[in-house]
Amino acid sequence: MNAAALRRILAQPGQALVALAVALFLAAFLIIPVITVMIAAFQPKGGSGFTLVNFADFFATDLFRRSFFNSLYVSAMSVAVATVLALPLAYFTTRFDFRGAVIVQTLGVIPLIMPPFAGAVAMQLLFGRNGTVNLLLDEAFGFKIGFMEGLNGVIFVEALHYFPLILINLSTALRNIDRAMEEAAQNLGCSGFRLFRRIVFPLAMPGYVAGASLVFIKVFDDLATPLLLNVKDLLAPQAYLRITSVGLADPMGYVISVVLIVASLIAMYLSLLALRGKDYATVQRGGGGLAKRPLGRGDAILAYGTILIVLVLTLAPHLGLLLLSFATIWSFSPLPDGFTLAHYVQVFSDSGQYIVNTVLYAGLAALIDVVVGTAIAYLVLRVGVPGAKWLDYAATAALAVPGVVLGIGYLRTYFGVTLPSGQSLAAFWGMIVLALAIRRLPLALRACTAALQQVAASLEEAAENLGATKARTVRRIVLPLMTGGLAAGFVTSFATAAVELSATMMLVQSSADAPLAYGLYVFMQSPAGRGAGAALGVIAVLIVGVCTYISNRIVDGDMAAKAGAH
Amino acid sequence: MDRTAAFQPVDITIENVDLSFGATHVLKDVNLDIQAGEFFAFLGPSGCGKTTLLRLIAGFNTAQRGRVLLGGEDVTHLPAWKRDVGMVFQSYALWPHMSVAQNVAFGLEERRLPRDVIAARVDEALDIVNLKHLKDRKPSQLSGGQQQRVALARTIAVRPKVLLLDEPLSNLDAKMRVQVRRELRELQQALKLTTIFVTHDQEEANTVCDRIAVMNDGVVQQVGGPMALYDAPANLFVANFLGTANIVAPVREEGGRAVLPGGVAVEVPRGGARLVFRPQNARLTQPGDALSTGRLRLPGEVVHREFLGATIRYGVKVDEAECLVDVPHLGGEAGFAIGAKASVDIDRARVLWLAA
């Protein structure tokens, strides 16, 4: 650091302190735990030094090798099935005069508000071997379909949950293709499938690949869904099982963590590569927004038919969960035997702590996210403290860290640290809050950065010109103008933190400390508890749904206010 | 080689076409006859329907009523990819994932021509537009003018019956526009292709085209050569759109005569018409000067004056109307000051009466 930079820092000690605090926060709760995990993978069991023997053991063991390939298989298939569901919808909404477009957009939101593990059990009841659909199929036609057998179940649930992301991704990629590109090809004699293959597909690919690789990684890292479906031969569940059953000294948990991180990084890199140098988005000129092709009768039947099927599939888990939450007994029959409110009563009275904990944890985590996110955004965009960019990179790096790995990292790093109460730091519920905060930080950071970018620097300069200090300017000018974006960021962080389960599973020590996602998992372990679990699931969906709605309203209101102000 | 041998240009007929997008009636009873080998322009303001008409010929729009004929063949219900009309899009629409050569080869590949023929035709087309040396570049590596020439080459390569150009000059800077429009004219003359050129710029249409269809609000106002349209506009819109026109409404009509501002009474060919004349067909005289035969006088006052180099443009207030008079600036003349009383002295032979 040269003298000028040093002087700049000392001139604004407050900012330097903030930067330091953020750096320490990230170091303590992201960087060090992850590095600890990675180091542990290369250390021989119980000792120190560098060795590759753990990795050798990993690939030599049949179970782990199988888990590795299963994880790859499940992730790839989930993306594939999600694409199959999304492609016709994306195609119809972007290429045709399609009144069903609004339905499709709504369809897109429904799966996202239900965490995959919540729907998993409901899907089991509806599509499992003895579930509603198969019982009816057996009765009518005498055969069953293994929708939910083993890995298929995971693929089915994940594909249904993530297809909206692929849908948005594909729609954007298709929409970004200037109509003139297609028309030029038609003008030269090309049409139908050839047109798709030569022009539309290559132009849509980069955008699609970028999004698909991110979905791949989310499925690859998912811990809760396989556990709930009792599928154990996948990487994330294996890591969980090794650490919880064999213990923190077991190297396999760390090896798997390294594999998960490396896979994340590769997927993110691929995503970046796909988009680099291929900015195929072309801007439509004035006449570009011309009428889309009108929908022919045959096409219309196909379109609405597809929507119907997808609608049924996306609503299935919600419906199943709802039914289960009100059901007395439901097994080996297409529908529940009877209905009751007892589960909800139980959830609110006996097990009220789940909901309280969730609101507490998610609220604190979202608060941390917004504060840290704003601090980093301000340091990067306005102050330019040397190294501010690195804070941004570090915070964003959390995207590459799966929840299970973060949980393991905290356990390993902080297990030995004891609090005044005698409890290990790793067992303290605050760690869950921190894990949630760190995991949601990248998204919150983007929201805060965007909110700050909307506030022109000249507005702050005008305040300083009139005598306000930096701190007062931030308080009186910047923060009020950012509120909309920050509120939306808070709500989104809250919603996703409320249903996070991967890191939570690793860190939760007792029911008293558990949020509702964990409560759901515990309840679902026994047939008697499934009703209460479902009730918790419904509450989870409601929380996320309401938060999504509020967030959208805030953003819309914010944009309208800004537009009206001009 | 004889480039014209392979091009078989056709005439185009638009018959009774009515086209609406939902509730918006965009083309209203359009009838046009375009000769084979003609360089024809659709000229008009934004929203007049000229691009819609062009796209109708290409097959990207369907009309609710009417027919489109290419070379006498009814193509109204033929899809775009079977029409064999070459279109150059306003945005050029070059495919970014293909090189220049691949872009140009596309149409030939769709026609399933042999590989060596394709290669030869690609070279030939790129040669015509002088871009052979850039054939392996990607479109993103080319300038705007070069991209347009690739788009042109891509269309010429398939030797279409008709060439459709959608505002080809609008993305180019002023200097390029003059150069490119000359090149387009030369190319069209060499290939003898029936060409339709859509533009809102009258100078482009005037300098390059054989005939122009002036359109407004979905209706073809007038069809004719540039000079014919300028000298004998059929209505006020055409008079105003092409060049500058002074439009003077009579104060009142008595019998078959109209009383103009200033008191002069003249015969009118029909009732309700307005007096129209061009600024260069009038001069400014002192109020007291003698009135020559064959000329018309409108007394008024100079309210503004612009020095335009070769001309001085005066704005003269005649009663409520304001007339523009262009006086050639040869140097040394005193001219009229603002506020001076002056009379607009018009050549009767150059005056038009157009319905309002």
Image (cartoon, coloured by chain):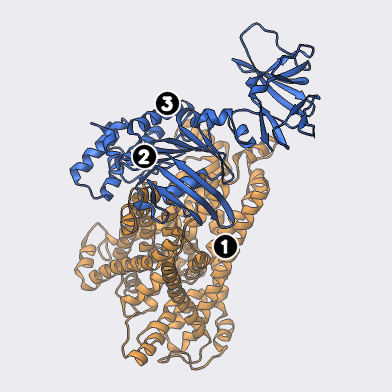
Chain colours: A orange, B blue
The three-letter amino acid code for the residue at tag 2 is: Ala
Residue A228 at x, y = what percent? 40, 78
Q: Secondary structure at mark 2?
A: helix
Residue A335 at x, y = what percent? 46, 89
Of marks 1 and 2, the one in the foreground: 2
Q: Which mark is residue B151?
A: 2
Quarter-of-image position of residue B12:
top left
Quarter that holds the N terminus of chain A: top left
Residue B108 at x, y = what percent? 27, 46
Q: Are callouts 3 and 2 both on one chain?
A: yes
Q: Secondary structure at mark 1?
A: helix
Does any portion of residue A516 appear in the rendered image?
A: yes
Of marks 3 and 1, the one in the foreground: 3
Q: Which residue is mark 3?
A: B179
In this rendering, the answer to whether A194 lies above or below B238 is below
In this rendering, the answer to whether A3 lies above or below A310 is above
Asked whether A208 or B68 is in front, the reply is B68
Q: Which residue is mark 1?
A: A491
Label 1 close to label 2 by CB (< 8 Å): no
Neighbour tally class for label 1: few under 14, some 14-19, many 20 plus, Cα within 10 Å? many
Residue A97 at x, y = what percent? 49, 61
The three-letter amino acid code for the residue at tag 1 is: Val
